[in-house]
Amino acid sequence: MISYLQIEKAEKVLTVRLNRPDKHNAFDELLIAELTQAFRDLASDAAVRVVVLAANGQSFSAGADLDWMKRMSAMGRAENERDAMALANLMEAIDYCPKPVVGVIQGAAFGGGVGLVACCDIAIATSSASFCLSEVRLGLIPAVISPYVAAAIGPRACRRYFLTAEKFDAATAAKLGLVHRVVDPEALETARDETVKQLLNGGPTAQVAAKDLIRRVTGAPIDEALRRDTATRIADARASAEGKEGIAAFLEKRKPHWQ
């Protein structure tokens, strides 16, 4: 069976590479299914601390595969909804991944490729990378990826880039908040390794809890329920074995056991 992914496992770090370079790593139903399963599997792998999402070839991802789109345009509404839900499940699998996910963007990210970037916790792009939410030029909309893209760049920027489908560069992506860091192409691996190293310094349970905390407080009113919830979360963290180890290591001027 053909695999569209290249998975590399080093100590504590799992790298998932899109591997359809001849198709610019465009999505079809097989790539979507394989990538979804990969993220679901690694979510429960205690040996994995950090996930790197990268791609082989010139492009990070060109979005939807043209042959796939042609097949789906010939299908009925029910088939299209099932197919779209598969992509929605992929985005959720990445966004809800309990491990820190680092996106490494070496080339163009168009359409659904922008959705992949937005679902990563940290995104690093080369200065030559480019981005485009191109759907309206095909008479379509970036529906499934929109919650994640809107969370990354905000509704005002979405009004522009969803409607114009104009291409923007990595510097603009950084200003919008889609990527966190832009580096020269030759510095991409170094930047990735630096980020991974920083992530491995954190407590793994705390990082899972931190991701869930962000989801809880985003957009929530600062009321009694939220204050109580956040107080409960920090109390739980302080009382946990990992929290006690982290404080003890800091006071004793040593590295905690997870490092």
Image (spheres, rainbow, N blue to C red):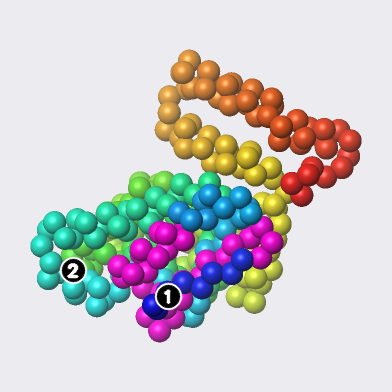
Comparing 221 with 3, the one in front is: 3
The range drawn in magenta is: 10-39
Q: Earlier in the sequence, mark 2 or mark 1?
A: 1
Query: Label 2: which residue?
Result: 72
Left or right: 77 as drawn, with respect to 48: left
* Up-down relation of residue 177 to residue 244 (above or below): below
Residue at position x 83%, y 37% in the image:
249
How crowded is the residue under tag 1: few (<14 C-alpha within 10 Å), some, or many (20+)? few
Residue 171 in sight from this viewpoint = no
Mark 2 residue type:
Met
Find out whether residue 28 is within the magenta segment: yes
Work out whether residue 2 can be spotted: yes
Q: Which of label 2 and label 1 is nearer to you?
A: 1
Residue 70 in the figure: left or right of residue 250: left
- The structure residue drawn at horizontal position 39% and vertical position 54%, both measured from the top left corner, is 91
Task: Name the side, left or right, on which 142 lies relative to 217.
Answer: left
Question: 122 or 245: which is nearer to us?
Answer: 245
The residue that mark 1 highlights is 3
Q: Position of residue 185 (x, y in %)?
A: 60, 75
Corner quadrant of residue 168? bottom left
* Residue lying at 63% horizontally and 54% vertically, measured from the top left: 47
Q: Which secondary structure lies at badge 1?
A: loop
Q: Looking at the picture, tell me which residue is in the foreground, 53 or 115.
A: 53
Mark 2 crowd level (few <14, some 14–19, many ≥20, 10 Å Cα):
some
Residue 180 in the magenta stretch? The answer is no
> Which mark, residue 243?
none
